[in-house]
Image (tube, coloured by chain):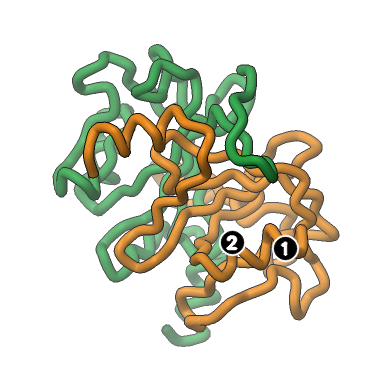
Chain colours: A orange, B green
């Protein structure tokens, strides 16, 4: 990428998403009410387009190799209230209103354990 | 992966990081003071080990293909106060005390623009 491209990508007002070698962006979902990180997933161009079109977070499931509407089976969809883009445009923050627990385990956030010297320890909400 | 492995990985107390096909975990850096997301990067086993050993956030630079101590040139290191692990152990949250602006552009966070229908718009701190 040329310096001009970098300059434009980092300081410009054009949305120029930079998908990685696998065609993916990283998406961090935060709760729009308090900023708590709820989950991390990946979006390809299709998931990004669907998310912008519907206002509900869609991802690309790497394990299933397909488009995934978060909450499609549980009903715990994520309504996107706002989106932030990072400097080199390869990561997004989705500020969302969750319809229920975000984690498939039933936890509010997928990040329910802390790493300690002795292993993982459950944390409170 | 068997169901037993999944169960252990999701509910156990063993740290069993699940690196992707490229040998990477996703790491989300948040400010330990207020939870604001500062940056997103990737860690391989080496970066994870160095981070745990030194208490300073290390990543694997995908563009440079090498270990990267965040702040090695700018001095704006990230002191890790705590680490959270997600359900399937392929993503981490690093709760950090930043020594200065985290973004190489000088912004506090790499996420300094919002996506709008008209493109990207700068946001305040």
- At a point 48% along the width and 37% down the height, the residue shown is A86
| Residue A49: % across, % down | 62, 64
Q: Quadrant of residue A83?
A: top right
- At a point 26% along the width and 52% down the height, the residue shown is B44
Q: Chain of mark 1?
A: A
Placement of A113 over or under B5, stated as above or below: above
Mark 1, residues whose alpha carbon is within 10 Å: few (<14), some, or many (≥20)?
few
Q: Which mark is residue A53?
A: 1
Q: Is residue B12 visible?
A: no
Q: Quadrant of residue A55?
A: bottom right
Q: Quadrant of residue A104?
A: bottom right
Sooner in the amino-acid sequence: mark 1 or mark 2:
2
| Residue A4: % across, % down | 29, 33
Q: How many marks?
A: 2
Residue placed farthest to the bottom in the image?
A: B2
Alpha carbon separation for disc pair 1 and 2: 9 Å
Q: Nearer the viewer, residue A118 or B84?
A: B84
- At a point 37% along the width and 43% down the height, the residue shown is B41
Residue beneath label 2, please?
Answer: A48
Q: Nearer the viewer, residue A72 or B16?
A: A72
Q: Is residue B46 visible?
A: yes
Q: Are marks 1 and 2 in contact (CB under 8 Å)?
A: no
- At a point 40% along the width and 16% down the height, the residue shown is B106
């Amino acid at each position: 990428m040329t310096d001009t491209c970098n300059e434009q990508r980092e300081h410009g007002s054009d949305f120029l998403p930079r998908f990685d070698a696998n065609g993916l962006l990283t998406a961090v979902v935060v709760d729009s009410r308090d900023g708590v990180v709820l989950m991390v997933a990946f979006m390809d161009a299709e998931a990004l387009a669907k998310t912008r079109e519907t206002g509900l977070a869609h991802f690309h499931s790497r394990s299933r190799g397909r488009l995934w509407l978060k909450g499609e089976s549980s009903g715990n969809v994520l309504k996107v209230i706002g989106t932030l883009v990072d400097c080199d445009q390869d990561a997004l923050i989705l500020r969302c209103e969750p319809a229920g627990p975000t984690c498939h385990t039933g936890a509010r956030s997928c990040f329910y354990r802390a790493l300690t010297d002795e292993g993982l320890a459950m944390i409170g909400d």
